[in-house]
Image (cartoon, grey):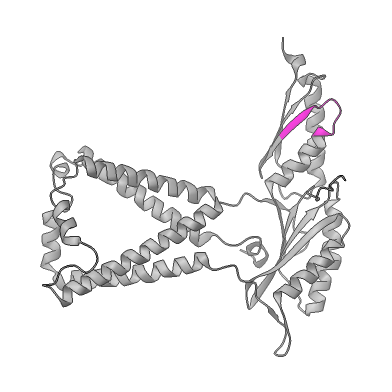
Amino acid sequence: MRVVVRIVAVLLALAIATAGALLAVEVGWRWLRPDAGPLVVPWPRWRAELSTLTWESTPVRVTALITAVAGLLLLVAALATGRRDVALLDPAPGVTVRTSPRSLARIVGTRVRAQDDVSGATVSASRRKVRVRASSAIEPEARLRPRLTGVVGAVLADLPLARTPRVSVVVDSPRDRP
Amino acid sequence: MTPSLRAVARSYRAERGLTGVVGLLALLAGALALVVAAGWLGRFRAARPVLDPVALDTIAAWPLMARIAAIVAGVLLLVLGLWLAARALRPEAHPDLRLDDALTVTSGALSSAIAADAERVRGVDRAKAAVVGERDAPALRLSLWLAEGADVKAVWQELDGSVLRRARESLGVDALPTAVRVELGAARRTRVR
């Protein structure tokens, strides 16, 4: 997503620069040579067309809709690019430590999968919450869940995290099915 | 924002800001045009042409003003657009450390020395270092891949006590703002032969 935003930003910046240059050049040209036609942009034709189109005409509505949707996409892309790093405690003044949510999920997942009676686990982690979904063929959820919650809590307690995320564990076991 | 926090990753503020502002403006403009077209601002307004003769007459009444404003706006947009494009395309700066007039440590030399030093810490599988920031306020970005089961707190202690202290001492600076990015349990897999 960050690469997308960077490419989009470059294209937008170049579009802004081009539009500005064309605006200045066309206005200046018209000022110097009022009788000559437009230099690059066929603006007299555009002006004639725009003065016949009304706001409620279909082309205007379609253009407005496309513009609004494109704007929304750009806005979402810009907002989605924020950093999701997990902060660790600073070991010394002037030193900042960050880790990725993915690596947090990886070590939690490794530890959970190493537990007895766990046949598989998926973990997603963020700065606020660690979600574990484990599956077990042998143990029911009521027995396995407290154990896994304790294990995940211990893994997190071992890390110097600036803020301990909440832990949620779900166990998927055939023993729980009637 | 402290220097070490700024060194965590390359700043995306300008790119995000540009994309977000353009997106917001496009969204508002499109929505406003739809509102006008729907007749919520009056049926009369909806039936008017997009390029309103009243607006054109207003501009025609002030020809000099309108022309100067348009040219100034065009030049400003050109400069702004070029500046933003150059900023987004520019690779991240890795400044050399200038210790005094005669002695400069290149960023590459410093990075590989610190990375090699960090890789010797127990529990660190791989390390990468880079000098980032401005020339007169350089900072260090250290990426560490920790082996599985590494004691993070012990790694911290050794990192600050030996690697970073040695770096500061060898450079003769009192403080070296440092951002450490750790990947936990991310040792390279050994291939079975």
Taken as a whole, is the magenta stretch helix, strand or loop? Answer: loop
- Residue B170 located left or right of residue B89: right
- Residue A8 located left or right of residue B51: right
Magenta residues, as a range?
A: A113-122
Q: Residue at x 39, y 55 (%)?
A: B22
Q: Residue at x 78, y 49 (%)?
A: B186
Q: Position of residue A51 (x, y in %)?
A: 14, 52
Q: Is residue A146 visible?
A: yes
Q: Quadrant of the N terminus of chain B?
A: bottom right
**View extreme (bottom): residue:** B102
Q: Position of residue A49 (x, y in %)?
A: 16, 52
Tell me if residue B132 is in the magenta stretch: no
Q: Nearer the viewer, residue B138 or B111?
A: B111
Q: In the rendered image of this protein, does residue B148 appear above or below residue B128?
A: above
Q: In the rendered image of this protein, does residue B83 appear above or below residue B185?
A: below
Q: Quadrant of the C terminus of chain B?
A: top right
Q: In the rendered image of this protein, does residue A46 appear above or below residue A140?
A: below
Q: Is residue B175 visible?
A: no
